[in-house]
Image: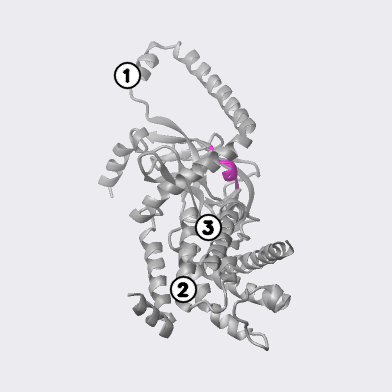
Amino acid sequence: MRNLLQFLAKHNRLIVFILLEGVAFYLIFTSNNYHNTQLVKGIRSSTLAWESIINDLTNYFRIKKLNDQLHTENTELRNTLAKITAKSKDTLSTIIFSTTEEPQYEFIAAEVVNNSVNRQKNFFTVNAGTRKGVNVNMGVISPDGVAGIIISTGKNYSVAISLINLDFRLSAKIKSNDYFGSLSWDGSNYRYAILNDIPQHVFLNKGDTIITTGYSAIFPAGIMVGTISDFEKSGSEFYRIKVKLATDFKKLSNIYLIKNNRSQEQLSIEKAFQ
Amino acid sequence: MINKILRYTVIYLVLLLLQVLIFNNIQFSGYINPYVYILFLLLLPYETPGWILLLVSFLGGLIIDLFTGTPGMHAAATLAAAFVRPYILISISPREGYKAETELTAAVYGFRWFVIYTLGMVFIHHLVLFYLEVFRLNDFFRTLARVILSSSFTAIIILMLEYLRKGR
């Protein structure tokens, strides 16, 4: 066998080249969804342990900042809680309503263990999997705003497609006037994304807030996406709006996965009409 | 022989660590992503048999792939660079030819030679890698700009690493 290989190689380097390149392309094409190959899955689990260690280390250096972030988020939550309890005292029906009905959205807290911002197709890995009830197509948000969508799950880890990925599309709207468009990343700067399909008669301001529409059954409506940093006319009908993303993907650490308890219902009804 | 294999393994491991821990986190304005690990392929001896060169580069790329979660991409790019390597070496061969048992470094063949060699290899590698990564042609010139800028940056880092390695 070794002699055969040696013979082939000596006389035809091209054969080895084409064979190996074939293997490489096979890997690229079969792993379109990034994690589907069993081979990679197996070996990933060993590199993941290593990545967890690196992540723990880097988190240690950012502990103060993370603490501050959690603190501010806590105060915000307290405030909303206070508002809600004050409201629900008003009418008995709201209390009954809120206790009998299952909430539409539930949040699962998790941490990012592997992340990238320097590629054209970025993904990140979170340390929550099917054991914690994570499913494909669950939205991922950071305390600051939208971060990504889960595309593959394992027992203890899941992989999410990052907002800063050329294949990512998000339905987003301008908070002040409710016009909605499609948000995507253009592959250049990881702090900015592009919002398309906003008609030119709409009045825009720099600094306007962009939020999710909630049309997709993945993200609830009204989650922060970013703010308008710049806009220009593209073609004759629409704007090309540059959005400064609220989430800093280089610092992505504590995140929440959003479970939509009614997504099945919405999708099956929508499917019935198509 | 064993000594040599050990030596190149250590070089590869150091480059792997540098790549995963430092250079994978470098990004300037979405245009510059250095992939410095390719240096291990530049340094392999001139007399390395073709099939070993290809196999080693394939495996080397594949290990990087495992750490970056991009199965096949770095393997394909490194393999392409390894395939072109003999042609580049022949086209820039010094007047007295290549000496056996020497490293392909600036110290042996001169600074100018090494710069051209590095630029050529890195450019091929980045060209394949970046177009495979984007996998579409509608951003053709933007990707080309990324290839050129990143290659230059990677080449500069490689030259610096070589200087540090020899400066010892």
Where residue A241 appears, x then y in whole percent? 59, 51
Q: Secondary structure at mark 2?
A: helix
10 Å neighbourhood of mark 1: few (<14), some, or many (≥20)? few
10 Å neighbourhood of mark 2: few (<14), some, or many (≥20)? some
Report the chain holding disc 1. Answer: A
Q: What is the span of residues highlighted in magenta in the rendered image?
A: A243-253
- Three-letter amino acid code at the position of disc 3: Gln
Could you tell me which residue is drawn at 63 percent across and 69 percent down?
B148
Report the chain holding disc 3. Answer: A
Could you tell me which residue is drawn at 57 percent across and 74 percent down?
B45
Is residue B52 at all visible to an observer of this figure? yes
Look at discs 1 and 3 and give the one toward the viewer: 3
* In-front residue for pair A195/A153: A153
Could you tell me which residue is drawn at 56 percent across and 36 percent down?
A144
Look at mark 3 in the image and give the residue it sits on. A120
- Three-letter amino acid code at the position of disc 2: Ile
- Give the quadrant of residue A8: bottom left
